[in-house]
């Protein structure tokens, strides 16, 4: 922090000290009350996050189920076409071997 050849760090340290003292003097609650308040807010925040995670989990499960259904349909269709292709190849092979 150099400006015009002068260091500004002593001013920064003085301002930090004044801010810390002001914070201690004008603190609205005692340490015990602040800790209790922080604990309550943290618990509320965790409850909210758990609810949102549950909702996300439910919607993800729905998406996975829809994906499984979609892939199942595609697999069945591909199995049908593969089976039909095998049947056709078998019949052509049979014709060639029996006829030739």
Image (cartoon, rainbow, N blue to C red):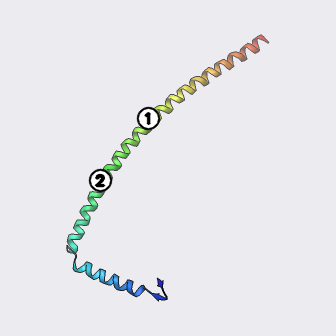
Helix, strand or loop at mark 2: helix
Horizontal relation, residue 29 to residue 51: left or right: left
Q: Residue at x 38, y 45 (%)?
A: 57
The quadrant in which residue 9 appears is bottom left
Q: Tell me the residue that label 2 is attached to.
A: 48
Looking at the image, is 59 positioned above or below residue 8?
A: above
Q: Of the residues under marks 2 and 1, which one precedes in the sequence? A: 2
* CB contact under 8 Å: marks 2 and 1: no
Residue 92 picture location, percent across and down? 71, 16
Residue 6 picture location, percent across and down? 46, 89
Looking at the image, is 32 positioned above or below residue 4?
A: above
The quadrant in which residue 31 appears is bottom left
Horizontal relation, residue 76 to residue 32: left or right: right
Looking at the image, is 3 positioned above or below residue 65?
A: below
Circle count = 2
Q: Tell me the residue that label 1 is attached to.
A: 66
Between 51 and 21, the residue placed more toward the observer is 21
Point out the image quarter for the C terminus: top right
Q: Residue at x 48, y 84 (%)?
A: 2
Residue 99 picture location, percent across and down? 77, 10
Residue 56 picture location, percent across and down? 37, 46
Mark 1, other Cα within 10 Å: few <14 / some 14–19 / many ≥20 = few
Between 20 and 93, the residue placed more toward the observer is 20
Horizontal relation, residue 87 to residue 67: left or right: right
Helix, strand or loop at mark 1: helix
Between 56 and 22, the residue placed more toward the observer is 22
- Of all residues shown, which one is farthest toward the right? 100
Alpha carbon distance from label 2 to label 1: 27 Å
The quadrant in which residue 91 appears is top right
């Amino acid at each position: 922090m150099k400006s015009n050849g002068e260091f500004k760090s002593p001013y920064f340290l003085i301002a930090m000290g004044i801010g810390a003292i002001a914070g201690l003097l004008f603190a609205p609650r005692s340490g015990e009350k602040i800790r209790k308040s922080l604990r309550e807010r943290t618990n509320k925040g965790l409850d909210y996050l758990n609810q949102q995670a549950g909702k996300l989990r439910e919607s993800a499960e729905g998406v996975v189920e829809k994906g499984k259904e979609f892939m199942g349909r595609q697999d069945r269709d591909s199995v049908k076409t593969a089976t039909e292709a095998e049947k056709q190849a078998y019949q052509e092979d049979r014709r060639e071997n029996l006829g030739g």
